[in-house]
Image: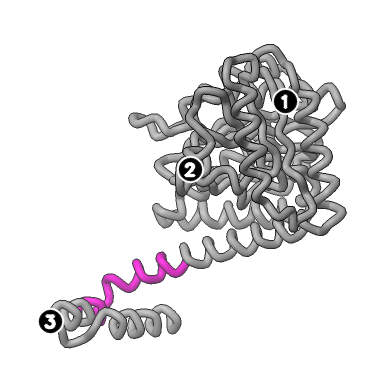
Amino acid sequence: MPRVDVPDLVQRARRGEHRAVARLISLVENGVDARAAASADTTARLREVAAALAPHTGKAHVVGLTGPPGVGKSTSTSVLVGALRAHGRRVGVLAVDPSSPFSGGALLGDRVRMGEHATDDGVFIRSMATRGHLGGLAWATPQALRVLDAAGCDVVLIETVGVGQSEVEVVGLADTVVVLLAPGMGDGVQAAKAGILEVADVFVVNKADRDGARQTVRDLRNMMSLDDGSEGWVRPVVRTVAARGEGVDDLVAALDAHRDHIDATGERERRRHARAESEIQAITLERLRERIGDLRGAAGWAELARCGGAGELDPYGAADELAGAVGGT
């Protein structure tokens, strides 16, 4: 495996070199995949990249865009990039695409739709494959987000695949969560059942030129009237027609207002602490799984399984013995 100069890549990425940013994201994607394959070299490289990036992160405003399929997330993301660039901000986009059933890679639909930004040095767009991971995000998204943050992006947009009842993981990564809905996509009760309304900081009713847009806005506001407002933030409902660029400046203003709010209240710091805690826990659990896998070839494992199968040891007792063995390795 060729040697990669990670500190040099990080310095080049911080200067805005797209090739260095792309290389770092590829390294973290490959490193995450390699953990399942127990590739020691690639896992070590992932750790090296994470350590090199850490001192340069924490500045970007991370915005997650989610919502049911068909509401226009990709178009909205593209016009939002243009509006942010008009304000002079460097923008990173992580477009999480469904995996190809053949190659396992991203289908790259979002990069095609955002081609108008391809020649802009102030924009970096990366499609990432979910590779079967539920939650609407790819496993490597937190690490890729760290790369774009360290590379000097003022705003990082994370566009997820469609969401469902358990697919609201974007809330764990974003400072501001935008939930997009559209007229004719089902009533408000169904949206509430999907588990997406409660994660929103900003609502967007896209395709607002269609029949039923006013009713969708009304339904959202009626639902929000049940909120006690304990967090001090009244979630705005922004109407847009992304295909024509209408309402996008209002969306930028809502994002800026929420960023100012979470900075003033300390909510951004709380969210980032929770994000770090979740990531550390996930890495720790992965390491424990690896240790359990290493024990499967040990003589005691077969005896433990035999005792459990024969009823000589209950599953909790067997788990206690396994936990003690893992802790002793």
Residue at 57% of width from left, 25% of height from top? 182
> 10 Å neighbourhood of mark 3: few (<14), some, or many (≥20)?
few
Q: Main secondary structure of the magenta part?
A: helix
Q: Which is nearer the eye, 311 or 38?
A: 311
Quadrant of the image occupied by residue 317: bottom left
> 10 Å neighbourhood of mark 1: few (<14), some, or many (≥20)?
many
Q: Is residue 291 magenta?
A: yes
Quadrant of the image occupied by residue 242: top right
Q: Which is nearer the eye, 280 or 194?
A: 194
Most extreme residue toward the top is: 244
Q: Which mark is residue 194?
A: 2
> 10 Å neighbourhood of mark 2: few (<14), some, or many (≥20)?
some
Q: Which mark is residue 80?
A: 1
Figure quadrant of the C terminus? bottom left
The mark nearer the N terminus, 1 or 3, is 1
The mark nearer the N terminus, 3 or 2, is 2
- Please state the extent of the stretch shown in magenta in the rendering: 287-302
Up the image or down, 272 lies above or below 128; here it is below
